[in-house]
Image (cartoon, rainbow, N blue to C red):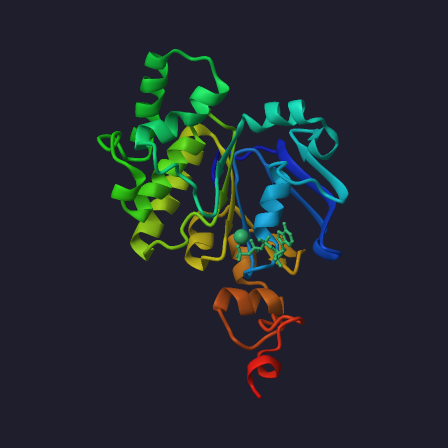
Amino acid sequence: MSQNISKEKVISLKGVSKFFDGRKIIDNVNFDIYSGETFVIMGCSGSGKSTLLRLMTGIIKPDEGNIFIRGKDISRIDIEELDQIRKSFGMLFQYSALLDSLTVDENVALPLREHTKLDENIIRIIVKMKLSLVGLRGFESYYPSKISGGMRKRVGLARAIALDPYVVFYDEPTSGLDPVVGGVIDKLIKDLSAKLLITSVVVTHDMQSVFRIADRVAMVHQGSIVKVGTPEEIKNSDNEYIKQFINGLPEGPIDFFTEDVDLFEEFGK
Ligand SMILES: Nc1ncnc2c1ncn2[C@@H]1O[C@H](COP(=O)(O)OP(=O)(O)OP(=O)(O)O)[C@@H](O)[C@H]1O
Ligand SMILES: [Mg+2]
């Protein structure tokens, strides 16, 4: 476990539920995330991981329950106050949207130009610093279409830390990357947390990644938390959902054919 973890709660979810089109997508979720830890949310596709991130970052509001960021209930505040809090968040989205018309350094500078009144010279220095933290010095003038997928993720990461956030949210940071590049991104997430004392919240279904980076893991299934524990506790859990998920077993309680899709009914005739 990393040395930087304190008992200060950065994020607390209390009885959080969210409905979409009458369906309960997030169901009475409770957990706390502590300062300095890497908290991983794992679960199958459609289990509600990205929705949890969108709730924690205030992009959407819960229908039930409360979400506290450093003790402040973000589900009950106005947009100006929320914007203020969100300036200290870094976000790396699932389909890390870099702007193709901007160069690498312009992409990283974007939040600095949007949210600060810093001098151009200072912005240029900060951008260089952030790019060296992710190992991309020298690529400032490249366009996103001219660099690899792993490099694009790193640019997204440099952009996510541009405003010196105390918490960074990552949605599937290693998806679509080969295992080696995925390993590089995982190492970066750990390094940045340690060097910059950042709390990291990482959504993933990449099992290798879970056990490489997590201080604690939450397993989510159909919008509910099955268990929160250390990687060791998750590995040794005898919960059938967790065993099926971490071992990638086709047989078990996780039903991949959801209630509204019956392939045999649809195509089998
Ligand atoms: N805005 C929305 N409107 C309606 N349904 C939604 C909305 N956002 C998410 N959902 C539904 O909520 C469920 C959970 O979606 P979510 O994107 O959180 O899953 P996920 O665990 O991130 O999946 P993946 O691993 O595929 O990214 C899905 O059934 C999805 O269709
Ligand atoms: Mg998702």
Residue 133 locus on image (x, y percent): 33, 31
Q: Is residue 136 left or right of residue 263?
A: left
As drawn, which residue projects farthest toward the bottom?
269
Indicate whether 253 appears above or below 11: below
Q: Quadrant of ligand 1?
A: bottom right
Residue 22 locus on image (x, y percent): 75, 56
Instruction: Specify the quadrant that holds the C terminus.
Output: bottom right
Q: Residue at x 64, y 56 (%)?
A: 227
As drawn, which residue projects farthest toward the right?
64
Q: Residue at x 62, y 39 (%)?
A: 56
Q: State the residue in front, 35 or 254.
A: 254
Q: Is residue 194 visible?
A: no
Q: Quadrant of residue 160?
A: top left
Q: Is residue 269 visible?
A: yes
Q: Is residue 260 left or right of residue 138?
A: right
Total numbered circles = 0
Indicate whether 219 appears above or below 96: below
Residue 268 locus on image (x, y percent): 56, 86
Q: Residue at x 55, y 63 (%)?
A: 236
Residue 202 locus on image (x, y percent): 50, 45
Q: Residue at x 61, y 48 (%)?
A: 51
